[in-house]
Image (cartoon, helix red, strand yellow):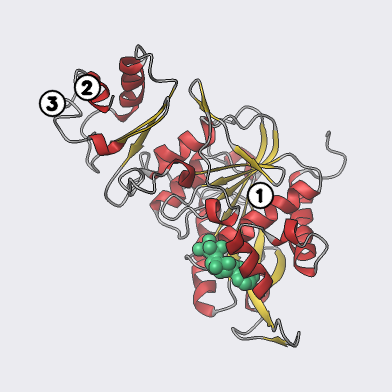
């Protein structure tokens, strides 16, 4: 079957390329995954690709459309090296007093999705994904139809954080998100082949993200939570500009270093005129699981002070607690596994602040 697919793809002529995708080594049989009738073809696009990227996907889809063995086909563009943004974002300074919404990049709205928020961090390992998952579940507990997109394609952690090992269904050309704990979730990790690490090895971030937001059948959502890749590089900046974001939340640990990174995060969203909903201090106070005593291992209140200084809201402090770590790694986030516990209360409180910001007052429901 792989041979047939490769043979068909090798007949595609892409303007600007001296040879076909197979001969050029952009698609090998490693990059084709077949699971029953589900086929995923990943195209390994070099960094400096001379041809028109936009054409590749429809051309492959067209070529393979006649194969009866294929029930569902997903074509993804990946890149081996550090990803470059497909579109270089233009940085614009918002003139004083101009309403933010008017100046925001004109990224097309996604049908069915009322609002999108990004959860970001200046660097990895600060608990961004854990926070994003629990906030999404907190939003859901408020009765909001919620989706969660793990856009951290360098290290997707959603499959682990929500204990999901199944593959999403693909219907027509749409990916059906997986439902867990009442929210719809999608992660690059769902499409990865554990035994085939070639897929998604350094994916082409922006193209991949666009596929994930726009080609996933989210249905009707009040809010889509985007778990951003850590850091503030070009890729993140482009995402912040390309996806129509209502606001961003920055997760930081109390350490100074993280706060410096967090400041970069703030600046990045400000540069593309995305409102900052606030900073969350994660791994704030350490609560001993044995004696219940609190200690400020990393210092405490740094993020709150910083938020004040920078004039952005402080959304809350989440303690460093074994229950959060254990449940996170078990795939049973505290907001659902200890729904009435103190940690869930903190996440829900933060979710409420976000929801109030997203849907102020008597918004239609
Ligand atoms: P990031 O997305 O920033 O890389 P993760 O959410 O994957 O970070 O978290 C990194 C590790 O820290 C995970 O093992 C997670 O369980 C743990 N963790 C995150 N937040 C907390 C917390 N408040 N208390 C205890 N452990 C936490």
Residue 206 lies, in percent from the top left, at: 41, 41
Quadrant of image for the C terminus:
top right
Residue at image location 47% in from the left, 47% down from the top: 189
Quadrant of image for the N terminus:
top left
Disc number for residue 19: 3
Spot the residue most to the front: 36
Residues tagged 3 and 2 counted as in contact (Cβ below 8 A): no
> Which quadrant of the frame does ligand 1 lie within?
bottom right
SS under mark 3: loop
Residue at image location 41% in from the left, 44% down from the top: 192
Residue 288 lies, in percent from the top left, at: 69, 84
Q: Seen in the image, is 270 located left or right of residue 318?
A: left
Q: Residues within 10 Å of mark 3 (few under 14, many from 20)?
A: some
Whether residue 310 can be seen here:
no
Q: Nearer the viewer, residue 220 or 307?
A: 220
Q: CA distance from mark 1 to mark 3?
A: 53 Å
Residue at image location 46% in from the left, 40% down from the top: 209
Disc number for residue 14: 2
Q: Residues within 10 Å of mark 2 (few under 14, many from 20)?
A: some
Q: Which quadrant of the view contains residue 114?
A: top right
Q: Which quadrant of the view contains residue 329?
A: bottom right
Spot the residue most to the right: 362
Say above or below: 210 vs 150.
Answer: above
């Amino acid at each position: 079957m792989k041979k047939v697919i490769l043979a068909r793809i090798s007949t595609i002529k892409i303007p600007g390329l001296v040879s076909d995708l197979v001969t050029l080594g952009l698609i090998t049989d490693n990059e084709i995954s077949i699971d029953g009738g589900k086929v995923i073809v990943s195209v390994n696009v070099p960094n400096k690709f001379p041809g028109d990227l936009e054409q590749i996907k429809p051309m492959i889809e067209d070529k393979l459309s006649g194969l009866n063995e294929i029930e569902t086909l997903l074509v993804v563009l990946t890149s081996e090296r550090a990803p470059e943004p497909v579109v270089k974002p233009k940085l614009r300074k918002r003139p004083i007093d101009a309403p933010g919404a008017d100046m925001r990049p004109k990224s097309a709205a996604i049908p069915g999705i009322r609002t999108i928020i990004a959860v970001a961090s200046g660097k990895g390992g600060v608990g961004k994904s854990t926070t994003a998952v629990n906030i999404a579940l907190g939003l859901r507990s408020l009765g909001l139809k919620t989706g969660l997109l793990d856009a951290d394609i360098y290290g997707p952690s959603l499959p682990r954080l929500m204990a999901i090992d199944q593959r999403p269904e693909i219907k027509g050309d749409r990916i059906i998100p997986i439902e867990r704990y009442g929210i719809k979730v999608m992660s690059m990790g769902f499409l990865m082949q554990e035994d085939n690490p070639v897929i998604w090895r350094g994916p082409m971030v922006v193209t991949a993200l666009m596929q994930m937001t726009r080609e996933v059948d989210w249905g009707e959502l009040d809010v889509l939570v985007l778990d951003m890749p850590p850091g503030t590089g070009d890729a993140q900046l482009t995402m912040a500009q390309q996806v129509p974001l209502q606001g961003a939340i920055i997760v930081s640990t109390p350490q100074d270093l993280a706060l410096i990174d967090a400041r970069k995060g703030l600046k990045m969203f400000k540069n593309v005129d995305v409102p900052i909903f606030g900073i969350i201090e994660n791994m704030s106070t350490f609560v001993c699981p044995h004696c219940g005593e609190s200690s400020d291992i990393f210092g405490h209140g740094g993020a709150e002070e910083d938020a004040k200084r920078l004039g952005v809201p402080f959304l809350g402090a989440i303690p460093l607690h074994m229950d959060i770590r254990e449940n996170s790694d078990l795939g049973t986030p505290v907001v659902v596994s200890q729904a009435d516990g103190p940690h869930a209360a903190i996440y829900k409180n933060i979710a409420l602040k976000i929801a109030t910001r997203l849907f102020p007052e008597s918004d239609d429901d």
